[in-house]
Image: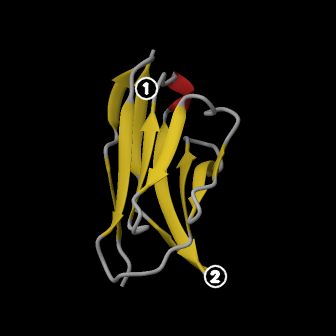
Amino acid sequence: QVQLVESGGGLVQAGGSLRLSCTNSGRAFAFSAMAWYRQAPGKQRELVASIVGGGLTNYADSVKGRFTISRDRAMKTVNLQMNALKPEDTAVYYCQMGSSGNSFWGQGTQVTVSS
């Protein structure tokens, strides 16, 4: 089965950087789209950034110019480079990969930005 494993979360001061990674460590699957979502306490899960097989990316307005999503050519790993972090970026970050109606999620990794 597909198993998405995330890494890279942690505690950082405002203005700092973190890099999140998510890899499929299970059964190989031909993903066509990959994304990062986040959920802060008391809030709904929201899309942070997405990337499709052709390399087209999409970002939430709140992270444009600060975050960069990337993926390996094999569409097995997706990364999120987060720069100029703000306290409001504090949340649990989830990776998501999907194709043809199938959607898989990672377990989530905590990102905490202190002021």
Q: Is label 1 in a helix, a strand or a loop?
A: strand
> Toward which corner of the image does residue 62 lie, by quadrant?
top right
* Residue type for callout 1: Val
Depth order, front residue of 108/84: 84
Which of the two marks, 1 or 2, is nearer to us in this view? 2
Depth order, front residue of 3/29: 29
Q: Where is residue 71 in the image (x, y as percent from the top left)?
A: 44, 56
* Residue type for callout 2: Gly
Q: Where is residue 76 in the image (x, y as percent from the top left)?
A: 38, 67
Q: Is residue 53 above or below residue 16?
A: below
Which residue: 43% across, 81% down? 29
Task: Estimate how packed mark 2 is, as few (under 14), some (14 to 19) or many (20 or more) residues with alpha carbons within 10 Å.
Answer: few
How far is mark 1 from mark 2, CA to CA?
34 Å
Which numbered disc, 1 or 2, marks the residue that appears first in the sequence? 2
Image side of residue 25 versus residue 30, left or right: left
Give the label on residue 6, or none. Answer: none
Mark 2 lies on residue: 101
Depth order, front residue of 75/91: 75
Which residue: 47% across, 79% down? 30
Q: Where is residue 18 in the image (x, y as percent from the top left)?
A: 37, 33
> Toward which corner of the image does residue 15 lie, by quadrant?
top left
Depth order, front residue of 81/72: 72
Q: Quadrant of the C terminus?
A: top left
Q: Are marks 1 and 2 in contact (CB under 8 Å)?
A: no
Give the label on residue 113, or none. Answer: 1
Q: Quadrant of the N terminus?
A: bottom left
Q: Where is residue 26 in the image (x, y as percent from the top left)?
A: 30, 78
Residue furthest right in the image: 61
Q: Is label 2 in a helix, a strand or a loop?
A: loop
Which residue: 38% across, 79% down? 2
